[in-house]
Image: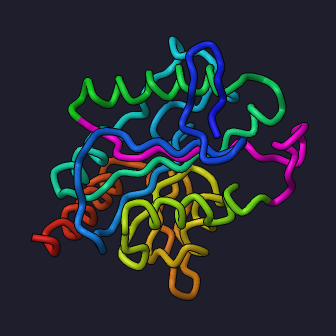
Amino acid sequence: MADTGASGPYPLAEPGLWVERVGSRVFLAGTPALFLDRDGTINVDTGYPDDPAKMVLRDGIVPVIAAANRSNIPVVVVTNQSGIARGYFGWKEFAAVNGRVLELLADGDAFVDMVLACAYHEAGSGPLAVADHPMRKPNPGMLFEAQKRLGADLKRSLIVGDKPADMQAGQRAGLPLGWLVDGVGSKQPGFEVLPLRNLDELDGLVGAIEALGSRLS
C-alpha cells in the first residue's frame, strides 16, 4: 500500500515499512551485500531527523560506500524510524531527509542501491503501534527483506551501524561481521564485531569490502 501524502505515493510495502529500490544496478544472485544503518552511521545523528537542511555526512563514510560500488556489491540502508510511529514527523519528512542524504553521497560519487525503513514502535499509535516488530532492529526482518529482493548472500554480507541493535540484527540474519561506529569489538559464536573509531579501522572496513569484491570477479 502507499502513503498518498502531499508528495506521495511512497514505496511502502506495508504501513510501517519503506522499501525503495534506488537506481538500476543489477547484481548476480548470491552476491554479498553491505548493510548500513543511516542516522549516526551515514549521516550525523540529529535525534529524530526531519529537516533535510541539517543533514551532514559522517567523516569517512563516502569511501566505504564507494568501495562497495566499485566492487559491485549492493549497498542497503536499514534504518529504524520510530519518530514516525511517535508522530514527530511523517513519511513525507522521511522522504525529504533520505533524499538529501542520498544527494550528499552522490556528490562524493557514492550510491545506495536499496533503502529500508521501519516505523513500527510500541510507543506509536494506530497500525504503527507494534512492539518488537520483526522488521525493527535488533530483529533481522529488514535484512531478510533485502535478501529476498536482491538475492543477496547473507552469510558473506557485512553490516555497519552505531548501535548494538544493528550488530544484533546482523548476527540474527547470519552475517559473519559487523562494524560498530565509535564502539568496541567483541566476538560471539559465528559473529564478530569490529570497532570503527579511527582511520586505520576505516581502512580495514574498506579492505574487507574490496576483498569481498575481488572474490566476485
Quadrant holding the N terminus: top right
The residue sitting at 16% across, 71% down in the picture is 216
Would residue 124 be counted in the magenta stretch?
yes
Decide if residue 85 is on the left or right side of residue 24.
Answer: right
Specify the segment rendered in magenta.
Answer: 110-132
Q: Is residue 59 above or below residue 187?
A: above
The residue sitting at 44% across, 21% down in the picture is 100
70 vs 57, nearest the viewer: 70
Q: Quadrant of residue 32?
A: bottom left
Quadrant holding the C terminus: bottom left
Decide if residue 210 is on the left or right side of residue 191.
Answer: left
Q: Total label count?
A: 0
The residue sitting at 32% across, 59% down in the picture is 205
190 vs 8, nearest the viewer: 8
7 vs 201, nearest the viewer: 7
The residue sitting at 26% across, 59% down in the picture is 73
**Residue 61 in the image, given as x and y percentages of width and height:** 36, 41
Would residue 103 be counted in the magenta stretch?
no
**Residue 59 in the image, given as x and y percentages of width and height:** 37, 34
Q: Is residue 129 above or below residue 190?
A: above
Q: Quadrant of residue 137?
A: bottom right
Residue lying furthest front in this view? 1
Q: Is residue 43 above or below residue 76?
A: above
Decide if residue 134 is on the left or right side of residue 6.
Answer: right
**Residue 96 in the image, given as x and y percentages of width and height:** 53, 20
Prevalent SS, magenta region = loop
Residue lying furthest left in this view? 217
**Residue 50 in the image, given as x and y percentages of width and height:** 64, 20
The type of colouring in the image is: rainbow
Q: Is residue 15 above or below residue 143?
A: above
